[in-house]
Amino acid sequence: MAQLNHTWAQSFILAGFSASGTLRPLAFLGTLCIYLLTLAGNLFIIVLVRADAGLSTPMYFFIGVLSFLELWYVRATVPTLLHTWLRGRSAVSAAACFLQLYVFHSLGMTECHLLGVMALDRYLAICRPLHYHALMSRKVRCWLAGATWVAGFSAALVPAGLTATLPFCLREVAHYFCDLAPLMRLACVDTGWHARVHGAVIGVATGCNFVLILGLYGGILRAVLKLPSAASRAKAFSTCSSHMTVVALFYASAFAVYVGPPGSRSEGTDKHIALVYTLFTPFLNPIIYSLRNKEVKEAVRRVTQRIRALLKGH
């Protein structure tokens, strides 16, 4: 019984990345720069959508919600990564570890649902243009946005709760934050059943939304190909291209980590792939939605002119 009591971990050690002493400061500075640019870029999108009346459409409402989500998404993991770059192997309490696991997966599944809602928005805009604004009224889009958060934070209770009840014989997590697969490798018991439950819950959140997105874009493709002019088709595709790029980045990296049993990949592989969706995708999202979007560029120009006019008035 005494031995069994010792299997319940009070704290964990985050291994982070193995790097020489000379590379660690460079890695820290690079990560810090990307982190600060990510925060600034997503804040920029949120403020711009709120400040410019030309971006008061349902599409930009959801882009603003996505940017707000990304702010919390990077804050859930990147500070831990920065700490491991500075201090190397880092201790974290079990409670903080499981909280990070829950918040991270809640935000990830919320983003899955939100990307599906954004695809629905594009489908209605292109395939049901006459009824679009009625179908996507402010009340409806607020309800849809709220539903994505409720669904994401509710579904994440299952994998986080099950993982927190496991007895752990080992303490060192081969990752820079607390994630499912690295934690389950430390358990003293067979985690096959837990892995199946985790796969079912995460699979529903990611797989069903991915199928929904594919189906909606199939409908969009059919509608666009029926448009009479090449210019109309190009304009329709351009409104979807940014969202399609974000979907491809997010799902490609997420499937690489979460499809298949936790033991199917070597230790350390997950944390390298995780950098894509925890650091680089949130960093790239504001760039994708701003540099590839003429309406955003026009909004920046209008807001800049208003700021200049205010400054001259003073």
Image (spheres, grey):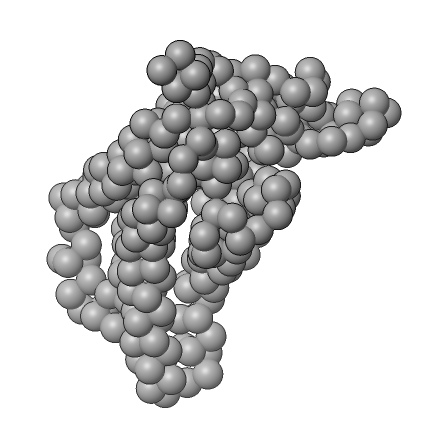
Q: Residue at x 83, y 27 (%)?
A: 20
Examine the image and state in which quarter residue 166 appears.
top left
Is 213 left or right of 88, judged from the image as shown?
A: left
| Position above or below: 99 against 271 | above
The location of residue 139, given as percent across then percent down, is 14, 44
Can residue 307 be seen in this snapshot? Answer: no
Examine the image and state in which quarter residue 120 appears.
bottom left
The location of residue 37, given as percent across then percent down, is 60, 32
* Residue nearest the observer in this picture, 45 or 279: 279
* Residue nearest the observer in this picture, 5 or 86: 5
Q: Residue at x 20, y 47 (%)?
A: 144
Q: Residue at x 45, y 62 (%)?
A: 244
Q: How many marks?
A: 0
Q: Extreme right residue here?
A: 22
Q: Residue at x 40, y 41 (%)?
A: 190
Quadrant containing the N terminus is top left
Is 53 left or right of 172, judged from the image as shown?
A: left
* Residue nearest the observer in this picture, 36 or 105: 105
Is 212 left or right of 28, judged from the image as shown?
A: left
Q: Extreme front residue here?
A: 1
The location of residue 206, given as percent across then percent down, is 35, 54
Can residue 252 be seen in this snapshot? Answer: yes
| Position above or below: 295 against 184 | below
The location of residue 89, given as percent across then percent down, is 65, 20
